[in-house]
């Protein structure tokens, strides 16, 4: 039984979504696991709705949208979802990853939390994701089977944001980022474009910020390319969409069920041409064999994608790979044949928020990676502003 009112735990990085003389284990990209399959629009096998979700206009809209895709919505009598457990962890994982629940967000979600270094505040329109990235940070955050929950109380969630404008505690206090206004991150626990065709939630959020005539910014990041529904709407430059990218050896091996890199970059171009501020979330950065050439190629592809875009506003957020003991165990349960390097011996231990241990690359590796990325980006994407490195 899965309690659909149960929120996820709070300690995750801002977005999902490394060389030195020191010996560091690198991801094994040899033929350990099959290459990740690219995305198709997600069609969940099972969609359920809890009774409180029926009372919200957006819950009704999602149900209609899901049914318009030919998917039946099962109306639950309570917030308890049964039938999720399979005979093995893999089976439970597969069932949950194929299930979408239309629910009302937990009341605790109305108290927004800062989400450093990405944004002043985070808010959620959904939790969970149908893709299969073998490093996914959600693995350390989900409690129970990874069912995707989408929120029916969207109007209340968006109305609640007004009380936080002008009270930013992260980017608003950062001299180089004050010009962004109060920032709100809406992709901490999910990938927006994996779900947008079923929910319409992020388009409504973009419209909400577009109509909100104040120094505020909506931010979200995605590994999908389904952006056409966002073109031509009144965003008024108050949404920054970032595309989460990686070098080809990482993206093709470890990011199952996401859009191909070239399609994500084409989507980035379409958004930039439509006047959106755009960005790159380069994550998780890994010192795979030949990383300089691989990430160099990625930067070349980005440069080609944004070439000639008038008044381009492009940022980069650089996030190295890390894991916790808990996320490692969950990921190895989900992806037992993964070639992803999660070797505690070759990492440095760091204490995260709430005292949790996380494993990051050693300082010399971090320095070498950071120096390389900063110099390559400034040389080859001269208009691109690096927002942070972590
Ligand atoms: Fe996790 Fe989905 Fe992002 Fe992949 S696309 S890292 S599965 S949230």
Image (tube, rainbow, N blue to C red):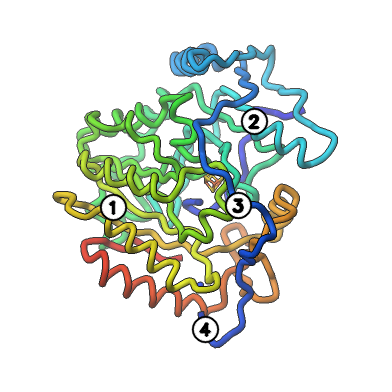
* Residue that label 2 marks: 98
- Element type at mark 1: helix
Q: Residue 20 carries which label?
A: 4
The residue lying at 55 percent from left, 50 percent from top is 255
* Horizontal relation, residue 49 to residue 383: left or right: right
Closer mark to the observer between disc 3 and disc 4 = 3
Residue appearing at x 56%, y 73% in the figure: 361
The reply to whether the residue tagged 1 has its Cβ within 8 angstroms of ligand 1 is no
Q: Residue 305 carries which label?
A: 1
Q: What's the CA distance linking mark 1 and mark 2?
A: 33 Å
Q: How many labels does the image show?
A: 4
Decide which of 89, 234 is in the foreground and name it. 89
| Residue 47 higher or lower than 31, as above or below | above
Q: Which residue is drawn at 26% across and 72% down?
A: 379
Residue 197: tell me if it is visible. yes
Mark 2 and mark 3: span between their CA atoms? 20 Å
Q: Marks 1 and 3: in contact by CB < 8 Å?
A: no
| Residue depicted at 74% across the width and 53% down the height | 336
Ligand 1 within 8 Å of the CB at mark 4: no
Comparing 57 with 263, the one in front is: 263
Which image quarter holds the N terminus? top right
In front of the other: 312 or 69: 69
Of callouts 3 and 1, which one flags the residue occurring earlier in the amino acid sequence?
A: 3
Marks 3 and 4, how far apart in space? Answer: 28 Å
Label 1: few (<14), some (14–19) or many (≥20) C-alpha neighbours in 10 Å: some
Q: Mark 3 points at which residue?
A: 35
Q: Are marks 4 and 2 in contact (CB under 8 Å)?
A: no
- Kindly state the secondary structure of the residue where label 3 is placed: loop
Pick whichever, 16 or 336, lies toward us.
Answer: 336
Q: What element carries label 2?
A: loop
Q: Which of marks 2 and 3 is nearer the N terminus?
A: 3
Among the two numbered marks 3 and 4 on one chain, the one whose residue lies closer to the N terminus:
4
């Amino acid at each position: 039984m899965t309690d659909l009112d149960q929120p996820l735990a709070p300690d995750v990085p801002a977005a999902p979504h490394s060389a030195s003389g020191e010996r560091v284990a690198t991801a094994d990209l040899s033929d350990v696991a099959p290459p990740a399959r690219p995305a198709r629009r997600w069609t969940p096998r099972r969609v359920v709705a809890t009774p409180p979700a029926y009372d919200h206009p957006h819950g009704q809209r999602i149900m209609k949208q899901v049914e318009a895709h030919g998917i039946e919505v099962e109306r639950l009598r309570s917030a308890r979802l049964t039938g999720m457990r399979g005979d093995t962890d893999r089976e439970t994982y597969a069932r949950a990853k194929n299930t979408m629940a239309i629910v009302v967000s937990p009341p605790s979600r109305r108290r927004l939390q800062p989400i450093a270094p990405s944004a002043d505040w985070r808010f959620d329109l959904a939790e969970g994701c149908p893709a299969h990235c073998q490093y996914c940070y959600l693995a350390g955050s989900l409690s129970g089977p990874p069912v995707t929950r989408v929120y029916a109380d969207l109007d209340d969630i968006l109305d609640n944001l007004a009380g936080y404008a002008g009270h930013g505690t992260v980017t608003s206090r950062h001299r180089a980022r004050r010009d962004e206004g109060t920032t709100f991150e809406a992709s901490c626990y999910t990938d927006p474009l994996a779900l947008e065709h079923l929910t319409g939630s992020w388009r409504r959020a973009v419209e909400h910020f577009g109509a909100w005539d104040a120094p505020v910014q909506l931010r979200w990041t995605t590994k999908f390319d389904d952006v056409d529904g966002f073109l031509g709407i009144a965003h008024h430059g108050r949404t920054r969409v970032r595309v989460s990218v990686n070098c080809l050896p990482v993206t093709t091996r470890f990011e199952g069920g996401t859009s191909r890199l070239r399609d994500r970059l084409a989507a980035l171009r379409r958004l930039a041409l439509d006047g959106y501020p755009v960005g790159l979330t380069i994550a998780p950065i890994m010192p795979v064999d030949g990383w300089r050439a691989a990430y160099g190629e990625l930067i070349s592809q980005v440069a080609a994608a944004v070439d000639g875009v008038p008044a381009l506003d492009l940022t980069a957020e650089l996030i190295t790979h890390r894991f916790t003991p808990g996320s490692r165990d969950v990921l190895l349960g989900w992806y037992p044949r993964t070639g992803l390097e999660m070797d505690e011996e070759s990492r440095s231990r760091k204490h995260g928020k709430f005292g949790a241990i996380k494993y990051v690359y050693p300082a010399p590796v971090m320095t070498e990676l950071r120096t390389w990325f900063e110099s390559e980006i400034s040389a080859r994407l001269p208009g691109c502003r690096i927002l942070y490195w972590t």
